[in-house]
Image (tube, rainbow, N blue to C red):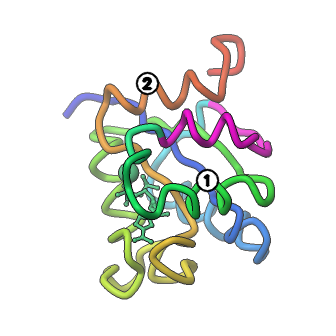
């Protein structure tokens, strides 16, 4: 299986609740290599652009409000089959449906405030990684 990259953000709920270290430990233990990492706060314009694919959805305003209310921890991760394996590690969007042991099962509070983002395709992983990190910040 090819080594490739995914992009993640630990969302404001996870950072506020003090779960940054525990979630990074789980990501490390699952075999992902950290290519880039930073704590940052998105502006409204950043969040609207990042989640533009959802701009017609009823939850869009709430999502932008949530994602900008405090800092996130953004990272590019590398591993064999990174996109799919990372989505397995984080679990279903709604923590009530997430498998035992997944990051969302352990740390998410609701469907909206679900602790962590994971890219849904190789193409989006590249777009999202480059949204947050310059070439000189990726190793
Ligand atoms: P993500 O993009 O953050 O990794 O999450 P996902 O693929 O599992 O879910 P997606 O459908 O892409 O939705 C993006 C984020 O929007 C919020 N959401 N809220 N209240 C709701 O019904 C609702 N539905 C989605 C969540 O924060 C979700 O992760
Ligand atoms: Mg998504």
Query: Bounds of the magenta span?
Result: 36-51
Query: Dot 1: few (<14), some (14–19), or many (≥20) neighbours within 10 Å?
Result: many
Instruction: Name which quarter of the figure residue 13 lies in.
Output: bottom right
Residue 68 x %, y %: 73, 53
Taking the spot 57% from the left edge, 57% from the top edge, the residue there is 61
- Disc 1: which residue: 64
- Seen in the image, is 109 located left or right of residue 74? left
Q: Is residue 118 above or below residue 97?
A: above
Q: Which mark is residue 126?
A: 2
Membership of 45 in magenta stretch: yes
Residue 93 x %, y %: 37, 69
Taking the spot 33% from the left edge, 71% from the top edge, the residue there is 92
Is the C-beta of the residue carrying label 1 under 8 Å from the nearest atom of ligand 1? no
- Seen in the image, is 98 located left or right of residue 68? left
Which numbered mark, 2 or 1, is in the foreground of this view? 1
Between the residue at mark 2 and the residue at mark 1, the CA separation in whole angstroms equals: 21 Å
């Amino acid at each position: 299986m090819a080594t490739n990259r995914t992009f993640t953000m630990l969302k404001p709920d996870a950072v506020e609740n003090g779960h940054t270290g525990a979630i990074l430990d789980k990501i490390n233990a699952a075999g992902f290599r950290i290519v880039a990492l930073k704590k940052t706060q998105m502006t409204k314009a950043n969040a609207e652009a990042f989640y533009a694919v959802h701009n017609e959805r009823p939850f869009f305003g709430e999502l932008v409000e949530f994602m900008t209310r405090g800092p996130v921890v953004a990272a590019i991760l590398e591993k064999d089959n990174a996109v799919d394996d990372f989505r397995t590690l984080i679990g279903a969007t709604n923590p009530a449906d997430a498998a035992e042991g997944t990051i969302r099962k352990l740390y998410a509070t609701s469907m909206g405030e679900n602790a962590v983002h994971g890219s849904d395709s190789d193409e989006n992983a590249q777009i999202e990684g480059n949204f947050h990190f310059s070439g000189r910040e990726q190793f």
